[in-house]
Image: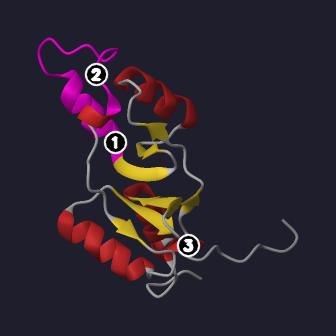
Amino acid sequence: MVDQSTPVRDVMTPAPITIGRAQTLSDAARRMHEHHVPHLPVLEGGYLFGVLSERDIDLVENLPDVDPDAVKVEEAMTQDPYRVGPDVTVGEVVRTMAAHKYGSAVVMHEGRVAGIFTTADAMNLLAAVLAPAAPPAAEGV
């Protein structure tokens, strides 16, 4: 059972889909769609430079005269994403995400991206906690 003291490494998405900062918003949107993910850690040479979300793409694409095939990921990404170590508790991560309205936490280990924990992950955990226990199976049915 997951509780607030569970380390985030136990509930994160390991080895998340990433993107390079010189790629275009069109590339990023395609990657998000293909892999069904709303956040992409932005890497260069294996190091984290930011996070790009679907909301970031939508915001920039809705500006006048913006060509998503020309705008680079680094122009739309969040440059200082919320980072945590793998041993930080889910309770601490969720409280920080809620307090600051972060959509994700990038889980870092030894300077590299180890995983990502998103609001969708937090909602799935909450749903599991709130779900009533399954009723016992009826015999002879």
Q: Which residue type does callout 3 highlight?
A: Arg
Residue 15, horizontal then vertical, whole percent: 60, 54
For residue 52: magenta?
yes
What residue did someone put label 3 on?
Answer: 9
Residue drawn at x 55%, y 69% as measured from the top left: 11
Residue drawn at x 42%, y 30% as measured from the top left: 28
Left or right position of 62 against 89 = left
For residue 57: magenta?
yes
Residue 130, horizontal then vertical, whole percent: 45, 74
Residue 64, horizontal then vertical, whole percent: 11, 15
Residue 85, horizontal then vertical, whole percent: 46, 74
- Indicate the secondary structure of the residue bearing disc 1: strand
Along the line of sight, which residue is nearer the eye, 96 or 73? 73
Of labels 1 and 3, earlier in sequence is 3
Which dot, 3 or 2, sits closer to the camera?
2
What is the total number of numbered labels drawn onto the structure image? 3
What residue did someone put label 1 on?
Answer: 53
Q: Which residues are magenta?
A: 51-73
Above or below for 14 versus 18: below
Cα separation, mark 3 vs mark 2, equals 33 Å
Cα separation, mark 1 vs mark 3, equals 21 Å
**Model colouring:** secondary structure
- Indicate the secondary structure of the residue bearing disc 2: loop
Which dot, 2 or 1, sits closer to the camera?
2
Q: Which residue type does callout 2 highlight?
A: Val
Q: Which residue type does callout 1 highlight?
A: Ser
Residue drawn at x 32%, y 26% as measured from the top left: 72
What residue did someone put label 2 on?
Answer: 71
Along the line of sight, which residue is nearer the eye, 11 or 130? 11
Q: Are marks 3 and 2 in contact (CB under 8 Å)?
A: no
